[in-house]
């Protein structure tokens, strides 16, 4: 049973490696627009800390999410939507929290523009937090509910590096409800995207990459994360079989140059 009271929805759970951090929104009653972002830690044995509101506001924060940097003394970034949905002005707020649950900063604005900014999600790419949200700044009129997807990077000290936002995907058709996976300096951002195709107009799930993925180590031929004799054996097996994966230099043929290139990379290592 969730700690706290109210009508609970929009549940998110993240792990810091030792315990879970659960966030959710809690409406004050079944027909009240007043809503709070609420958090609680859960130990491995199921014990929960008392629920509390990590934002500086009461009654006007919703759809929260959280990301953790990792490490024993890491930082959390808690994000939320400011104001209730009965308010015409919604923005994205955040707050940096220490690993022990104390706060390193006060609340701060991550994204605020014309129209509404809604449904934030957050990841950590190893360098910065990456916050992504539904954005209506490009709407044609106040009743135009179509959204784009925008993002911003936030440092572990709470500095917003992209206060104007980074457009991830925008256009005449609606894109909404982002999800994010961040690691090694890059983020994969998925969202629902309307794709007009003859006889098959439909919402599809699309993915956009933000940042550069780490380069693959080509000498790790079997992609097991290490370069060792097994890679050499696997390459030679593919090479003498003339297998396409032995085309090490991607020139369209398997020949002696692939062998020389692989061996050179193998002895240099990764």
Image (spheres, rainbow, N blue to C red):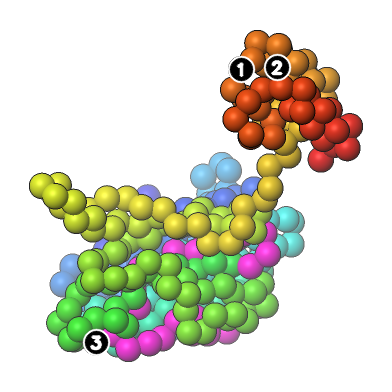
Please tell me how crowded label 3 is: few (under 14), some (14-19), or many (20+) other residues with Cα within 10 Å. Answer: few
Picture coordinates of residue 83, whole percent (x, y): 33, 83
Q: Nearer the viewer, residue 187 or 86?
A: 187
> Where is residue 23, by image quadrant?
bottom left
Whether label 2 touches label 1, CB < 8 Å: yes
Q: How far apart are marks 3 and 2 (CA)?
A: 64 Å
Q: Look at the image and say whether residue 36 sits in the magenta stretch.
A: no
Label of residue 88 in the image: 3
| Residue at (67, 22) in percent of width and height | 254
Picture coordinates of residue 1, whole percent (x, y): 37, 50
Task: Say which quadrant the C terminus sits in.
Answer: top right
Compared to residue 269, the image places residue 114 above or below, namely below
Mark 2 secondary-structure assignment: helix
Whether residue 38 is visible to the viewer of this picture, yes or no, is no
Residue labelled with disc 1 = 243
Q: Which numbered disc flags the more N-terminal residue, 1 or 3?
A: 3
Please tell me how crowded label 2 is: few (under 14), some (14-19), or many (20+) other residues with Cα within 10 Å. Answer: many
| Residue at (73, 55) in percent of width and height | 71
Q: Nearer the viewer, residue 161 or 108?
A: 161
Q: Look at the image and say whether residue 121 sits in the magenta stretch.
A: yes
Mark 1 secondary-structure assignment: loop
Image: magenta residue range: 104-128
Q: How many marks?
A: 3
Q: Distance between the residues labelled 2 and 1?
A: 6 Å
Q: Which numbered disc flags the more N-terminal residue, 3 or 2?
A: 3
Please tell me how crowded label 1 is: few (under 14), some (14-19), or many (20+) other residues with Cα within 10 Å. Answer: few
| Residue at (50, 57) in percent of width and height | 209
Q: Is residue 201 left or right of residue 229?
A: left
Whether label 1 touches label 3, CB < 8 Å: no
Residue labelled with disc 2 = 239
């Amino acid at each position: 049973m969730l700690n706290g009271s109210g009508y609970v929805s929009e549940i998110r759970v993240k792990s810091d490696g030792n315990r879970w951090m659960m966030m959710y929104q809690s409406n004050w009653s079944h027909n009240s627009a007043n809503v709070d972002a609420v958090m609680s830690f859960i130990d491995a044995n199921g014990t929960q800390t008392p629920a509390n509101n990590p934002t500086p506001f009461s009654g006007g924060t919703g759809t929260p999410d959280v990301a953790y940097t990792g490490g024993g003394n890491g930082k959390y970034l808690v994000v939320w939507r400011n104001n209730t949905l009965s308010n015409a002005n919604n923005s994205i707020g955040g707050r940096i929290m220490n690993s022990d649950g104390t706060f390193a900063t006060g609340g701060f604005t991550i994204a605020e523009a014309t129209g509404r900014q809604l449904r934030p999600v957050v990841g950590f790419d190893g360098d910065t937090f990456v916050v992504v949200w539904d954005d209506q700044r490009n709407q044609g009129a106040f009743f135009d509910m179509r959204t784009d997807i925008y993002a911003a990077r936030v440092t572990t000290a709470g500095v917003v590096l992209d206060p104007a936002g980074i457009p991830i995907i925008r256009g005449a058709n609606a894109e909404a409800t982002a999800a994010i996976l961040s690691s090694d300096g890059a983020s994969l951002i998925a969202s629902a995207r309307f794709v007009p195709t003859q006889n098959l107009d439909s919402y599809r799930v699309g993915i956009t990459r933000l940042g550069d993925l780490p380069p693959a180590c080509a000498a790790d031929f079997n992609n097991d994360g290490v370069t060792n004799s097994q890679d050499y054996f696997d390459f030679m097996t593919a090479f003498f079989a003339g297998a396409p994966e032995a085309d090490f230099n991607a020139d369209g043929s398997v020949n002696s140059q692939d062998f020389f290139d692989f061996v050179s990379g193998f002895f240099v290592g990764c």
